[in-house]
Amino acid sequence: MILLELLAGEAPDVKVRKNFLLEAALVAWKTVEDMDRAQEILSLAAEEFGDDDAVLDRYEQLLTETQRVEELEELLRNRVDLTADPEARGDVRLRLGNLLLNLDDRSGEGVEELLAALDEAPGKEVLWKILESLLGSDDTPSEDRLKIAEALEERYPEETPVDRVRTTME
């Protein structure tokens, strides 16, 4: 791991440096099981290669596995801002929305992110299913259910929206 970090520091080529950092983080994470060191390395790599999906994916995976919620939320919000493709941005918003839904008193923000994801990627069936599930759940706060119902009524394609929302809520 230390050798890989040293090699990364000396690498004349940016791509080689990125690969050494990713490998060093992987060794720290999976072999040595030093999650703090893996996070430090991936944080450094994310700062240097902030638009590289491989780096950001690996960092997101580590933060998810280690349940570092605040760092994960920050990373996902940054990814939303950096992602140009609407479909890919919808995927990131979906992950951010799911994260927020599982945090105390943040379900409203989670619903907002899921609705924004639906705007970005309306063809993503899993978003519809999640939102419909939230709409039909007694565990979903009433203000969130109302927000979801209104949003889905506006977005349902070529069906009678009111009927589909009523069916979902039953």
Image (spheres, helix red, strand yellow):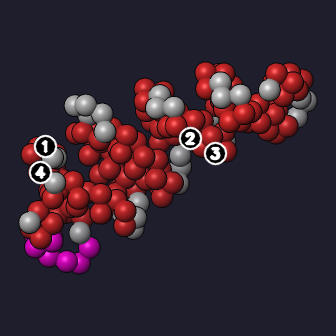
Label 1 and label 3: CA atoms lie apart by 35 Å
| Residue in view at x 23 percent, y 59 percent | 133
Please give the residue where the numbered disc 1 appears in the rendered image.
Answer: 141
| Residue in view at x 91 percent, y 30 percent | 12
| Residue in view at x 40 percent, y 56 percent | 120
Nearer the observer, 146 or 1: 1
- Mark 4 touching mark 1, by CB under 8 A? no
Query: Which of disc 2 and disc 1 is earlier in sequence?
Result: 2
Q: Position of residue 105 (x, y in %)?
A: 22, 31
Please give the residue where the numbered disc 2 appears in the rendered image.
Answer: 61
> Which of the image's four quarters has the C terminus?
bottom left
Nearer the observer, 31 or 21: 31
Q: Look at the image and give the residue range highlighted in magenta.
A: 157-165
- Mark 2 touching mark 4, by CB under 8 A? no
Q: Secondary structure at mark 4?
A: loop
Q: Secondary structure at mark 1?
A: loop
Amino acid at circle 1: Pro
Nearer the camera: disc 1 or disc 3: 1
Is 162 a magenta residue? yes
Q: Position of residue 2 (x, y in %)?
A: 82, 21
Label 1 and label 2: CA atoms lie apart by 29 Å
Please give the residue where the numbered disc 4 appears in the rendered image.
Answer: 138
Label 3 and label 2: CA atoms lie apart by 12 Å
Please give the residue where the numbered disc 3 appears in the rendered image.
Answer: 53
Nearer the camera: disc 4 or disc 1: 4
Nearer the camera: disc 3 or disc 2: 2
Q: Position of residue 34 (x, y in %)?
A: 65, 24
Q: Position of residue 135 (x, y in %)?
A: 17, 56
Q: Quadrant of residue 70?
A: top left
Amino acid at circle 4: Asp
Q: Is residue 138 left or right of residue 52?
A: left
